[in-house]
Image (spheres, rainbow, N blue to C red):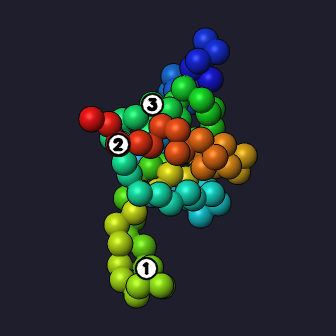
Amino acid sequence: MLRDGQINPLNVHGLRELENKCPPHFVQVLFDLATSKKNITDWIYENLEGRFWYNEVYYHNAETNSIELKNVAAFEIAGEASMFALCLSQFNTYQN
């Protein structure tokens, strides 16, 4: 973790954030973005250590029967997805 001053080999080799496609075994967390993408990815780099994928996806809302654009962060380590989901409301806030 970056905040502990430990070097993560995935960061050094540029393998931490996946760019193209979300692997099927990653655990996804869907959310509405209230801050910038940079704030989200910075928090992930500072507080988590596994591989992740971040992008926007179209989501079918069954209640309203509409298609919505949602942000999704997916994590290879399921515990990191839980940590992200629990802490999301603290750093995903509107800024003036």
Rendered-image quadrant of the C terminus? top left
Q: Quadrant of residue 9?
A: top right
Q: Residues within 10 Å of mark 2 (few under 14, many from 20)?
A: few
Counting other residues with Cα less than 10 Å from the Cα at mark 3, is it few (<14), some (14-19), or many (20 or more)? few
Residue depth check, mark 3 versus mark 2: number of the one nearer the observer: 2
Mark 1 residue type:
His
Seen from this angle, which residue lies furthest top?
A: 5
Q: Which residue is mark 1?
A: 60
Q: Disc 3 to disc 2, how far (Cα)?
A: 16 Å
Q: In this figure, which residue is indicated by the disc labeled 3?
A: 42
- Which residue matches tag 2? 94
SS of the residue under disc 1: strand
- Work out whether mark 3 precedes mark 1 in sequence or the reverse, and give the earlier one: 3
Quadrant that contains the N terminus? top right
Residue sitting farthest toward the front: 96
The answer, for residue 56, to whether it is visible in the render is yes
Q: Position of residue 71 (x, y in %)?
A: 41, 57
Q: Position of residue 17 (x, y in %)?
A: 48, 40
Earlier-in-chain disc, 3 versus 2 = 3
Which is more toward the observer, 36 or 52? 36
- Residue kind at label 2, given as amino acid type: Tyr
Residue 12 rendering spot, x and y as whole percentages: 51, 22
Quarter-wise, where is residue 60 in the image?
Answer: bottom left
What is the C-alpha distance between the residues marked 1 and 2? 25 Å
Instruction: Specify whether 87 is left or right of 72.
Output: right
- Residue found farthest to the bottom: 65
Which disc number belongs to residue 11? none
Tag 3: residue type? Asp
The residue lying at 48 percent from left, 85 percent from top is 62
Q: 8 left or right of 35? A: right
Q: Position of residue 46 (x, y in %)?
A: 54, 26
- Eyeballing the image, is 67 above or below 21? below
